[in-house]
Structure formats: C-alpha cells, structure tokens
Amino acid sequence: MKRRLVATAALVFLLASAAFAAYEPGSDMTVGFIFVGPIGDYGWTYAQNEGRLAVEALPWAETVYVESVAEGQEGPVIDDMIATYGCDVIFTTSFGFMDGTVDAAARHPEVIFGHASGFKRLPNLMTYMGDFYQVYYLNGIVAGALTETDKVAYVGAFPIPEVKRHLNAYAMGVKASNPDAEVHVRWIYSWFDPAAAAEATEALVAEGCDVFAFTEDSPTVVQIAAESELLSFGHYGSQMYQFAPDYVVSGQAIDWGIIYVDFLQKVYAGEYTAENIENVDYWWLMTQGAVYPEAAPGVVLNPLYIDALKAYMIEDPVYGTISAYDLHNLRYAQFADPGVTFDPFQGPIYDRNGNLVVPEGMWLSVDSLITLEWAFENVVGPWPGEPE
Amino acid sequence: MSWESWIVSTLSRTLAYGTPLLLATLGEIYAERSGVLNLGVEGMMIVGALTGFAVTSGTGNPWLGILLAAAVAGAFSLVHAFASITLRANQVVSGLALTMLGLGLSGVVGRAYEGRPLLHALDEISIPWLEKIPVLGPGIFQDQSPLVYIAIALAVLLWVILFKTRIGISIRAVGEDPATADSMGINVARVRYLCVMVGGMLAGVAGAYLSVAYRPSWTDGMTAGMGWIVIALTIFAFWNPLLGLFGAYFFAALFHLSYRLQAWLPPELLKAMPYILAIVVLIVVSRGTLQKRMGAPSALTLPYTREEG
C-alpha cells in the first residue's frame, strides 16, 4: 500500500515536472492566445485570430485560444491554459491584460509570455504592437483630396495617446493634401458601441463632414456614412468594405501573423527563452509589413476613386506639383522602405495651441509617440487631456 | 450652422435612436404593471436582434424578421415567466439570468452571421405631404423607419388598454394586489404570463429594429447596454406608456445632443449627462410615498401564492 502511494506520488511528480518544464528549443510547441473579444468581431480580435492562424500553419506549433475574456479575468484563464494544455508560449492580446499577464509571468517563470500594446516586461514577458499611425497618414492624404466640404471627420474611441497619435497622423495627411481642410473629432468612450458610433457619425454629418475615419470595432461608421452617400476608411479595412463597397475608399489593415511567426521562430531556434526577453519589444510598422492601407482584401485604394485622386493636384514643398494619388503611393513606398525616409512626426510641428511640439530636424521617438497628448493644428473639436 | 439644421437633426435622430428604447420600455411597463420585474430586457433584445437579422437575411423579408423576432423573444421571456411566476423564484436573479443567457446564446448562435451585410434592410419611408412642412417635415416625417411610427401608435394603444379598458384594470389589479384580483376571479398567473410575454415580444421588436433598420448588421453584444436604460426608463415613465414615449425621446435627444455639443462642452460630462439625469430621477421617484403615488405597482417583484384554505 505504502509503496503504491510512493509510486503514485513519483508519477504525479514526473508528470508535473514534465508539464512545467521549460520549452526545449526545436521541439513542438503549444501556443495559447487570450482574446478580449469574440473572434468574429469586425476588428481587433478578428485580426488577432488571423495572426493565430498563421502560427497554426507552422509545422511545429499548435495553438489554443480563449475568446471574450474580460479584462481583469486573464489570470485564472492563463493558469487554466497552462494546466490543461501545457502551453509553452502565451500571448495576451489586449492592453487591459497587462497587469494580469505580469503576475502570471511571475507565477509561471518557465512559460514565455507576450503582451500586445503594453509596456511592462519581464525576463519571460515580451511586448509587441503593430501600429497604424503611418496608415492613418496615408488615409489622411486621400481624405484631404476627396473632401468637398473641407471638413473631414474622425470618430474616436477614447482620448488616449494611441488614438490621439492616429488622429494626429490622419490630420497631418489631410493637411499634406489639403491645407484648408479641418478634421472634426467626436469621442464615444468605448471600443465597441454601435449606437454611440452611429449618433457620433450623425452629429458629424450634421456638421457638414463628408469623409470619415474612426476607431471602433464595428462597421457602424462605414454604414451610417454610406447612408448619406459619404466616404469612409475601414478600421481593419477589408472586413468592413463589404458593408459599403462604393463608399469605403481605403482603410487600416494589420498582419499580426508576421510578428507572431517572427517571434516564435526565434523561440524555436533557442534565441529567445523564458530568461532573456526582458528587452524584446516589437514595434512593427509598414517597413516590416505588419500594417498597410487596404480597402478590400488585396486592394489598397477603391478603384472608384483613383481617377479623382489622380486628378487632384497638390503643391508639395518638396515634390512640387504632384497628384494625391502619386503622393499617397510615394509616401507608402517611403514608409515601407527599410531605411524609412519619411515620418509624419517630423519637426517642426506645432500643436493647435501654437506650441512647438516637435522641433525642426527632430523625429518623435517611440516613447514620445506612445505618450502623445497634443492635437495637430487642423483638428477641431474636444480633446480631453490637452496640454495648455 | 443654422438653427433649422439643429432642430431637424435632433428631431430625426431622437426618433431613430428613441424607437428601440420606446418599444422595449412599453413592454417592460406591461410586465412590471402586472407585478413582474424583468431584468432580462437586454437578453431579450439581443435575441430579437439576432432573430430579426437571421430571418431577414435568410428570407429577404425584414417584416418577417421583425415578426419572428417578436415571437422568439416572446418565447424566450417565458423562461423568466416560468421561473418567477410558476416557480416563484427571485425575479431579480431570474431576470439577470435571462440577460446573461440571451447574450451568451446569441453570441454562439450568431457566429455565422458576423460580418455579413444585410441586403434587404427595412427601408426608410417619408410621409407624403407631411414631409413638405418646413423644419418639422424633414425632422419627423422624412427618411424614418416605419417602426418609428408603429412605436408611437403602440404607445398610445397600450396606454388606452392599460388605463381605459377592463384588460388594463385586470393587469393593474394583479400588479397592485394579486390576492384581491384573484378573489375577483382574475387568473393572476395567466395575466402575468401574458404581460411578461408582451414585454418579451416588444423587446424582440426593439432588438430587430437595431439589426434590420437602425444599423443593418449583426454584431455580438450589439445592444450594448440599451436594455438597462430601458429598466431605468420604465421607472422614469412612472409605469405609464405615454410618459414612456416622452422618457425614451428625452433620453434619445440627450444621447444625440451629447455628440453634437461635444464641440462646446466637455465630452466626459456630456457622455454622463443622460445617465446622471436618469439617476436623479430614480432617486426622486424611489422615495416611497411618491413612488406609490406615481404608479409603482405594489406587488412588483412579489411572487403570488394563493392562500388555500
């Protein structure tokens, strides 16, 4: 009897140590994903799940996921994933999972963690983000060229640095093609609230705006703008195109997969382990191909608007007379160039209160970009948290 | 910006956004008048939204979608009716369960409909002649969903039934004093079942309005808390269908204006405004004596057990 007990205990211990052993480079790995929304939303989580599918396609990786996890509830879900599936790597894909992920990474030092859009790291916790600001700049060039009322609209989720950065980049693009145009903004204080997005859009329509960009995870703004025959840029573009194929001009798209695959390949090769990723922070942009403008799958600009963009001439300080179409493609090429020869946040830049926020000859660092609070000069409307 | 455009956009958006609130509030008024608090409005609305969308995209007929949304959400509300009337379970718990069940079920079943555009949305209509009236025409009678006018007609009809007919007396009697109503020969359980079901049907139509008219598409969780506003509006309206009409439109006007006024007033304040007002009214109304006078059913949330001799 006693011997049997000892044997059982030994077996349990063996199994337990097998389950909790650190990942052996070159072996098969199990990768867990924790999603904040349903994978069928039109935005963030849908794109994240596409990234997961890219991982699933790796011959040595298999994936598991849990969707619609409320922020703050990630801790037990992570524990459960590790206990049930023996995950070697876990990605938590929402900013609000940050603290729970940090705690879980401390509890499970043998597991490798990645947290999207956050800034806290540990030896076994890296951070990653694909950022849209360059894409919004390109969308802004198009919006400035196509507006007839010189009022371009933006429906923003929350007035936080991420959305402000995108809005400013959009406004800078608008100014590049149309110095007379204003960018009108409304905030809905939600990442997902179709009714609020609808009424904010209607309010902007009533103000005379005729081209819409937004941050909200439903196609509401696209639909409401199209009802009034007004143009829009899809957020996670290709998903929303089908709701108004004649009115979606372009949009923002992301490929999380290339970030995941790049990171996991380095784990597979033994370069990244649960002990050395404290300084790993992916901030991937167009150069890496992580983000790109897209109206429909594989279509950068809606063909219906290409003639108008070719006919719209801009006086650019560097390139002289150039069409909006050519300027868009030129900037796109510059963003995608590994040397990165252009950035919208390039001094001198003044905010709308007349403060010099980026001095001549300077580019904003990533740290400044992720803490940005000011509003660009052509932005009209509320701006909570605006510096004096 | 001319003042006419302000009036036109405020009127027209108030009707558009106020309609689902009104429909569901009318239903909840009936349920509560009969003595059954139903916190499952959010769940019944989302079930209606999914049913409306699914049937409309399957058959191409938005009216059929709306009718079936009423039927399915009405049937769904029977879960609460059974638990709270027949089993005499706690109404708060059972209603909350209905909301959670509705949100969860619709999320799972609705997977297949995510991201699908609706080809046969409910068309907007304009009322001939009336739409030509300056300002009021474009504000009220132009490019509105037919459900907007149906909801107004229903508010009047349901007020008449509740306060001017024998049926209404029975409903109110059951909600005020079920024992007396019972001794008068009214079947308490049957009245309550019917009222809960009317509430479910109207919440279903409200949900279908969202998915086939207001913003024709299905998204998981798309009612985004409207059902809770309805619970507050029911009290706000003193359990009176006509006051429900004003309450729903008042809230909708504030909701729309909170976005238009953002250019001048702090958006944080505007965003909170409709809710702050709702809370203030709730506090005022919930003072006991006033509540009695304002029409709160005395037997609300109380299960009825017949005293057998």
Image (cartoon, rainbow, N blue to C red):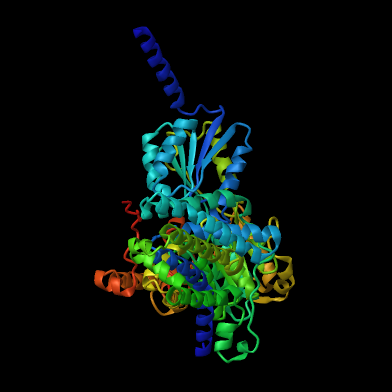
Percent from the top left, x then y, of residue B177?
33, 64
Q: Is residue A365 left or right of residue A177?
A: left
Percent from the top left, x then y, of residue A44?
54, 54
Q: Residue at x 63, y 51 (%)?
A: B112
Q: Is residue A163 left or right of residue A181?
A: left
Percent from the top left, x then y, of residue B288?
25, 69
* Closest to the observer, B114 or B186: B186
- Which image quadrant is residue B142 in? bottom right
Q: Is residue B88 above or below residue A316?
A: above
* Closest to the observer, A75 or B306: B306
* Closest to the observer, B256 or B166: B166
- Which image quadrant is residue B265 in? bottom left
Q: Is residue A124 visible?
A: no
The residue at the far bottom in this view is B134
Percent from the top left, x then y, of residue A252?
60, 60
Q: Is residue B164 above or below residue A268?
A: below
